[in-house]
Amino acid sequence: MTPELIWVNKEHQVGLFGFGFGSIIPSYLANPEAAEMVLPYLPPEFQQSLGPSIAGDIFSAGTILYELLTTIPAFVAETPEKTLERVLQEDPPPPRAIDTRIPSGFNDIIHTALHKNPAHRYPLASDLLTALKDKKLSDSIAVAKAVQEKTANDDVGKYLQRYAKEDDKRDSQVSAALSEWRQEEEIGRASCRERV
């Protein structure tokens, strides 16, 4: 799971696309721009060919939560190889160390979600959700707004704006694909009714 695979429609419903990374690390190492969009979100065990798991999804969700809170990726380096090394060997700074307006309770949540050992992460997504609710995320909306304002004029803001434009483009592509699929489905149903 990466930020590019998450979309929110006008009704504020969240959707996920493109499940399953497969054996992608070698191909991403050859394409630095694509690597920047995927490798920082891959769990450490993925590099050891252990394949997808709930624990891996928790890790990826933790990286996205970290980026939402701090406006910077948890794991990013000058090259794809160094990014993978950072995912394997380093812990990111606690969110509150980056911005003191972030409630300290998020430090524990992030630390657990991004643990290098999958067995030490939240066992289920519902456990992560429970931890987030316990920290009263709704009380942190002001923090998110402040962070958004802070980044509007710096490089991170430009980075986020770039992804927002890509999201808009992807939304229109998804809408077109869904519309085409519905038309084909309707044609198929009409064809079946004619045969009956």
Image: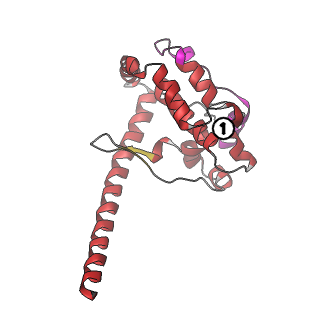
Q: Which residue is mark 1?
A: 83
Q: Residues within 10 Å of mark 1 (few under 14, many from 20)?
A: many
Is residue 140 visible in the rendered image? The answer is yes
> Does 160 sit left or right of 42 as displayed?
left
Quadrant of image for the C terminus: bottom left
Task: Please provide percent x and percent y for residue 10.
Answer: 27, 43
Query: Magenta part of the protein: which range?
Result: 79-105
Q: Which amino acid type is marked by label 1?
A: Thr
Q: Nearer the viewer, residue 167 or 132?
A: 132
- Which residue ends up furthest to the bottom in the rendered image? 195
Query: Which residue is more in the foreground, 171 or 179?
Result: 179
Callout 1 secondary element: helix
Residue that appears at 42% across and 41% down: 163
- Look at the image and say whether residue 84 sits in the magenta stretch: yes
Residue lying at the far top in this picture: please name it: 100
Display coloring: secondary structure
Tell me which residue sits at (57%, 53%) in the image: 20
The residue that appears at 55% across and 31% down in the rendered structure is 127
